[in-house]
Amino acid sequence: MKRRGRGIACMWYPIGFTVAANPSAAVVKINEDGTATLLTGTVETGQGSLTILAQIVAEELGIATDDVHVVSADTDTTPMDTGAIASRTTYVTGNAARLAAEKAKGILFEVAAPLLQVKADQLEVCDRKIQVKGFPQRHIDIGDVADRARGVNGQPPIGSATFNPATVALDPETGQGKPFATYVYATQIAEVDVDDETGEVEVLRIVASHDCGTPINPMLVEGQVEGGISMGVGFALEEEILFDASGRQVNSNLTNYIMPTSLDMPEVVVEIVDSYDPTGPFGAKGVGEPTCVSTAAAILNAIHDAVGVRVTSLPATAEKVYAGIKAKRAQEAKQITAG
């Protein structure tokens, strides 16, 4: 018969590298039509990083995300980026993009200040306009100011910046230190059905609560979490590299290397913990790799809750689960006999 169980797993995960330089650079240019161009060396691999970076620049400049044209990963034109790795893009590259936009905005403020008869620190940006704080009726379009900066003042509104998180070297004796600038946290709860006659496991539902700082784009965060959970389900129950006696992989293609499909996905409920990291761009941290860290542990804990079997090697195939159930029954029978 099928037995239902629930399991929980928690995790923390660092953003970036360990005790090493981890820089990103960015260039932002504000155009005469009020749009902006962002140059970044980061790579879009489907995680939505270019959308996030465009949103960060747009927020800093007071324009729409669609007004930001992103040029990425072109070594002829874009500045250095350490890479779309280590769940670092939103935090590290995002900080560089925000700082570059801030510098470009500063040039606009210096040009607009005498036109609005105020000091530069009395200005703000909103809805494609540079306006006086507290007096939004006194404003100039960003595009007009950019045109004047370039055509009259001879200083195009271009900002460049780099961001490299501070790290503290680890003590060689104790191993203690601060190797990362920030961390993210998550808890996942899995609900499964386990057939105690076959060992087959069906994941019914996973509830995932993730703290990634302030979510720049909540929909992308949810997509990342759902994608990470799909990887975690495969890690927990299906994916395994097999070798023959000579060390050759015997399941080197998708006909016999088993991966979860959409039909294997459970119901996923994503809860985003809206926190704020003062060192991140607008309070953001990251959400990439951490999304699949808790999944396998939660599923295996749920299996244990359902049938009392602790699987200690992945994947937890039906054969392993059933072998554990048989061993548990044999042990129980032995104890009854001995009693």
Image: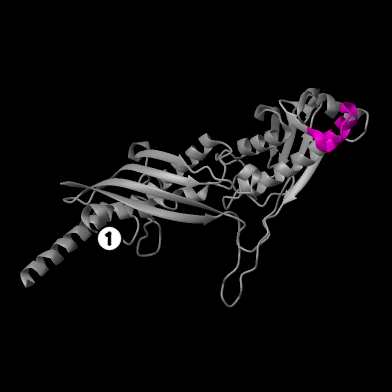
Residue 149 in the image: x percent, y percent?
A: 88, 31
- Boundaries of the magenta span: 107-123
Q: Quadrant of residue 47?
A: top right
Tell me if residue 115 comes above or below residue 160 in the rendering.
above
Residue at image mark 1: 310
Task: Say whether residue 124 is visible.
Answer: yes
What's under tag 1, amino acid-wise? Arg
The one nearer the camera, 302 or 258, is: 302
The one nearer the camera, 238 or 334, is: 334
The one nearer the camera, 254 or 35, is: 35
Residue 268 in the image: x percent, y percent?
A: 38, 39
Residue 151 in the image: x percent, y percent?
A: 91, 28
Is 65 magenta? The answer is: no
Residue 174 in the image: x percent, y percent?
A: 56, 75
Color scheme of the displayed model? one colour
Q: Residue at x 71, y 31 (%)?
A: 62
Q: Residue at x 76, y 40 (%)?
A: 102
